Amino acid sequence: MSRLTGKNKDGYYGLISDESIYEAIQKLGALEDACDDLTNSQKQIPKELEELRLQGKEKTVRYKETMTQKLINSNIIMFLERYGLYR
């Protein structure tokens, strides 16, 4: 990934060049979309797990994969929160 931003001497980010503003906006929009998808997925997973539990399918591959996805999503969220990119 090529950088579009850099930190100045005060520690604030700015664009490396004025021509990169469009690309920076596109990347920011893509990040926001990814965070929205992640949020929606995390909201849906407990419903899916509960449905599988009610069907007595706690030992199925689908249940284990869904639980694994929940843990992966949680790790991604914690990583993004560490950089102030997810709230």
Image: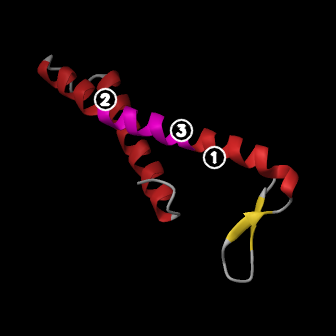
Magenta span has 55? no
Let me know if residue 59 appears in the view.
Answer: no
- State the extent of the magenta-drawn residues as a range: 32-44
Let me know if residue 78 appears in the view.
Answer: yes
* Residue found at the very far front of the displayed protein: 18
Magenta span has 35? yes
Q: Nearer the viewer, residue 41 or 23?
A: 23
Quadrant assignment, res 15: bottom right
**Mark 1 nearby-residue class (10 Å; few <14, some 14–19, many ≥20):** few
Indicate which disc, 3 or 2, sits on the residue closer to the N terminus: 3
Principal secondary structure, stretch drawn in magenta: helix
**Mark 3 nearby-residue class (10 Å; few <14, some 14–19, many ≥20):** few
Residue, x 77% and y 44% (percent of image)?
Answer: 23
> Is 57 on the left or on the right of 13, as rendered?
left
Whether pointer 1 and pointer 2 mark residues with C-beta atoms closer than 8 Å, the reply is no
Tag 2: residue type?
Answer: Gln
Tag 1: residue type?
Answer: Leu
Tag 3 secondary structure: helix
- Mark 1–mark 2 Cα distance, whole angstroms, equals 24 Å
Residue, x 69% and y 68% (percent of image)?
Answer: 13
Q: Nearer the viewer, mark 1 or mark 2?
A: 1
Q: Which residue is mark 2?
A: 44
Q: Which residue is mark 3?
A: 34
- Quadrant into which the C terminus falls: bottom left
Residue 28, disc:
1
Residue, x 86% and y 59% (percent of image)?
Answer: 17
* Residue found at the very far bottom of the displayed protein: 9
Indicate which disc, 1 or 3, sits on the residue closer to the N terminus: 1
Tag 1 secondary structure: helix
